[in-house]
Amino acid sequence: MLQRSLKNSDRRLSILGFGCMRLPETPDGRIDEETATAMVRYAIDNGVTYFDTGYTYHNGESEPFLGRALRGGYRERVTIATKLPVWKVGSREDMGRYLDEQLARLRTDHIDFYLLHGLGRRLWEKMQDLGVTEFLDEALADGRICHAGFSFHDSERVFRRIVDSYNWTFCQIQYNFMDTEYQAGTAGLRYAGERGLGVVVMEPLRGGLLAKSLPEADRARSASGFHGTAAEWGLRWVWDHPEVTVVLSGMSTQDQVRENILYAEKGRANTLTDRELIVYDAIRSMYRERNRVPCTQCGYCMPCPSGVDIPACLAIYNDAFIYDDRDTARFVYRVFSRSGGDAARCQDCGICEDLCPQHISIREVLADERELLEE
């Protein structure tokens, strides 16, 4: 398994990380412990060293599962990343309570990589007010965590602000060949690299959407001389960026584990050819032609007086049609809503429509988004 160095650290991490949010489940919705444990241990035996989980994953069962799966000497061979559920935190004391609970769940005395989960502007301001930087300093000093970072869902401008607000070791962003300007995007990736942060990438295949067959995209890849899968094609693009340290994959089957480990053998940076990069651009255009509304993410509609993040809402709305997957769009919308800025905040004032150079009926779209994606 190829590894990359974590900047400002002596750590080297496998370029493929195992995301524990989409583990196989039994018919009653619980983690299929036997199958998932076999997957985790196979991954470790084949060089995967970075395991990412979260307090709320699998209805709170992901962390305890991982703690059990790493028994028998496996814990000593890996690094664990998990996350403080910041939307649940109401006080400084809550932070320590959650961390201690997570240590017990994971059956460990330290967490290698500890993240503030899903930061955006509102959640970051809340956590600052509650004293989260002092909490992180104390947890680092007493050894309960080894490296502090954050995962992120907001604009590139907010990303830069958070990066500059603390001495982070790493960050986690959504990034794939479709999301070059979404949230932190390529500009944020490069900024993190310039600031010396390691970068862990989530959703490299958009929750599996980019691994699906799109006939015109399949033909374009084949014409370029590439005969692998859509999943390999998507992962190679992310690994090609030298700023990326680890690419997470939320694997649900043993076949996915085996395939991704094979793909990672070719995951060196700066190896895509100019011809291949042209094909990525062409496929990106194929997907974007499926947009329902012609939003260019220019931001002229902002700021919304009611607090709606209009460009983000329209991007999620478009994604539901680009990838023809309402379930994934609902999940993304639910996560996004935790940070505020969701369509439900719209007060129907219409100011945004007066400012939109594309003349989008924004209020109508936001109302349709609520009907389509809110649960």
Image (cartoon, rainbow, N blue to C red):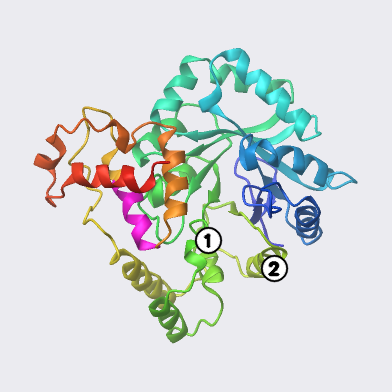
Task: Locate residue 345: give its quadrant.
Answer: top left
Foreground residue among 141 and 336: 336
Residue 140, visible in the rendered structure: no
Task: Using the image, tell me which numbered label, if any, was put on residue 208.
Answer: 1
Please give the range of residues in magenta. 314-323
Along the viewing direction, whichever of 108 and 134 lies nearer the viewer: 108
Identity, as a three-letter code, of the amino acid under mark 2: Asp
Res 255 label: 2
What amino acid type should be assigned to the residue bearing mark 1? Answer: Gly
**The N terminus - image quarter:** bottom right
Q: Is residue 143 left or right of residue 290?
A: right
Q: Which of the two labelled residues, at mark 2 and mark 1, occupies the earlier sequence position?
A: 1
Give above or below for 375 relative to 204.
above
The image shows residue 301, relative to residue 269, as above or below, that is above
- Give percent across and percent down for residue 176: 46, 58
Q: Is 258 positioned to the left or the right of 121 in the image?
A: right
Q: Position of residue 308 (x, y in %)?
A: 28, 34
